[in-house]
Amino acid sequence: MTDKVLKVGVMSFEDYKRRTTAIAKGEYRPGKDEPKIWFESVQSMARVLSNENQELLKTIIRQKPNSLKELEEVTGRKAGTLSRRLKEMARYGIVELVRQSRGTKPIVRATDFRVEFGIHTSF
């Protein structure tokens, strides 16, 4: 697996709405190097990229489980908790959940993260 850097940004909901509106109106065009994934706060980003979730990602990379059931056995975590955490990370493109005949296989898609935020809007 090659390392994939996921560039994430932190922007308030109000600023994100203004940015999205400016893009829709053609008043602002995002640069190709800008984050594609945005969190509303540093706290929400920290929840998704917590140490516990990073350890879960490392376990998936090392163990290569073929299903959530296998991941549950390897980690000792409950299926419901694993499923919720992985679905949230999937929404951000960090993992992919691939449905197979034997269950859902978690695949890590992002291994490194670059965070961008500031107090001034750039659009």
Image: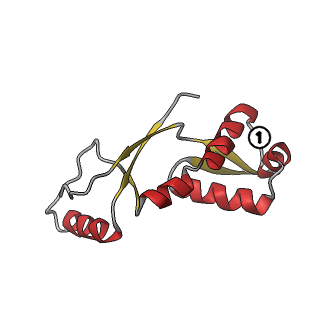
Left or right: 121 as drawn, with respect to 51: left
Pick whichever, 122 or 50, lies toward us. Answer: 50
Residue nearer the viewer, 88 or 104: 88
Q: Secondary structure at mark 1?
A: loop
Q: Position of residue 78 (x, y in %)?
A: 81, 58
Question: How many other residues sit within 10 Å of disc 1, few (<14), some (14-19) or many (≥20)?
Answer: some
* Residue at figure coordinates x 55%, y 57% from the top left: 47
- 41 lies above or below 21: above
Residue 82's quadrant in the figure? bottom right
Report x, y in % for residue 54.
61, 43
Residue 26 falls in image quadrant: bottom left
- Of residue 4 and residue 15, the one placed in the foreground of this image is 15
Task: State the residue lying farthest toward the top.
Answer: 2
**Residue at the image position 66 percent from the left and 49 percent from the top:** 98
Horizontal side of residue 28 vs 54, given as left or right: left
Q: Is residue 94 visible in this depiction of the protein?
A: yes
Q: Measuring 67% from the left and 41% from the top, which residue is drawn there?
A: 55
Taking the spot 80% from the left edge, 45% from the top edge, the residue there is: 75
Question: Quadrant of residue 70 in the image?
Answer: top right
Q: Quadrant of the N terminus?
A: top right
Query: Which residue in the protein does label 1 denote?
Result: 65
Report the side of 68 relative to 31 (left or right): right
Residue 113 image offset from top left, x and y in percent = 46, 40
Mark 1: amino acid? Pro
